[in-house]
Image (spheres, rainbow, N blue to C red):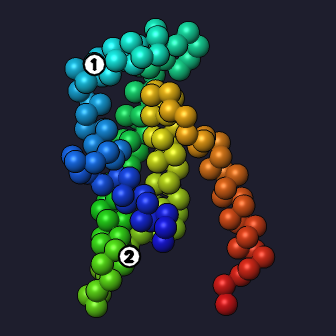
Amino acid sequence: MMAALRAALLLDRDDTKVSFQTIHSRLKSKTVQRSLKELLGKKHGLNEIFPPSRDELIAGFLEAYSEIDCEVHGRLTHFRNLGIAHLTIEKMSKSIKFDELRDLVSIISRLTAAIQQLCHTQTAFREWMLEDYREIARKAMMKNPPA
């Protein structure tokens, strides 16, 4: 449930908050891309000598975002609203499958990695860690099967 809730929050569009949907809508603008690269150049120096370049990172972000299935995202939002955030007696008419949630988490991981590299953040997450954490969860579930 936490994965569903966090994925929904990261993908929600809210112009007053930072989300991947908000970043995506801004990064589609060449003017915004140019301004961002300019500001990053002033803060961190010239474009990286070794790949990926800022242009490649932006393109990678846009490409990864384009892989989000809008129908799945809509069902995730419905599940979040009726099944997690606002428990109601109303029957849920839509939900999300585990494989679909896993795909969204994978896309979100790639989006995170692109933004972290682009903006030189100091957070600890790296894209390769996703498989490590998945394996830890798998082993934990094998030791403690559901009752």
Q: Nearer the viewer, residue 29 or 103?
A: 29
Residue visible at 38% across and 42% down in the picture: 65
> Above or below — where is 146 with respect to 10?
below
Q: Are marks 2 and 1 in contact (CB under 8 Å)?
A: no
**Sooner in the amino-acid sequence: mark 2 or mark 1:** 1
Residue visible at 35% across and 44% down in the picture: 20
**Residue 82, image quadrant:** bottom left
Residue type pointed to by label 1: Ser
**Residue 134, image quadrant:** bottom right
> Above or below — where is 4 with respect to 34?
below
Q: Nearer the viewer, residue 94 or 49?
A: 49
Mark 2 highlights which residue?
A: 84
138 relative position to 96: left or right: right
Q: Position of residue 103 (x, y in %)?
A: 50, 55
Q: Residue 88 — which label?
A: none
Q: Nearer the viewer, residue 29 or 116?
A: 116
Q: Position of residue 93 (x, y in %)?
A: 30, 80
> Above or below — where is 77 with respect to 54?
below
> Above or below — where is 127 with respect to 96?
above
Q: Is residue 32 in view?
A: yes
Q: Position of residue 52 (x, y in %)?
A: 53, 20
Residue visible at 67% across and 56% down in the picture: 133
Q: Is residue 75 in view?
A: no
| Category of crowding for the residue at label 2, using alpha-carbon neighbours closer than 10 angstroms: few (below 14), some (14–19), many (at least 20) | some
Residue type pointed to by label 2: Ile
Q: Please tell me whether mark 2 sits on a helix, a strand or a loop.
A: helix
Q: Residue 35 — which label?
A: 1
Residue visible at 38% across and 76% down in the picture: 84
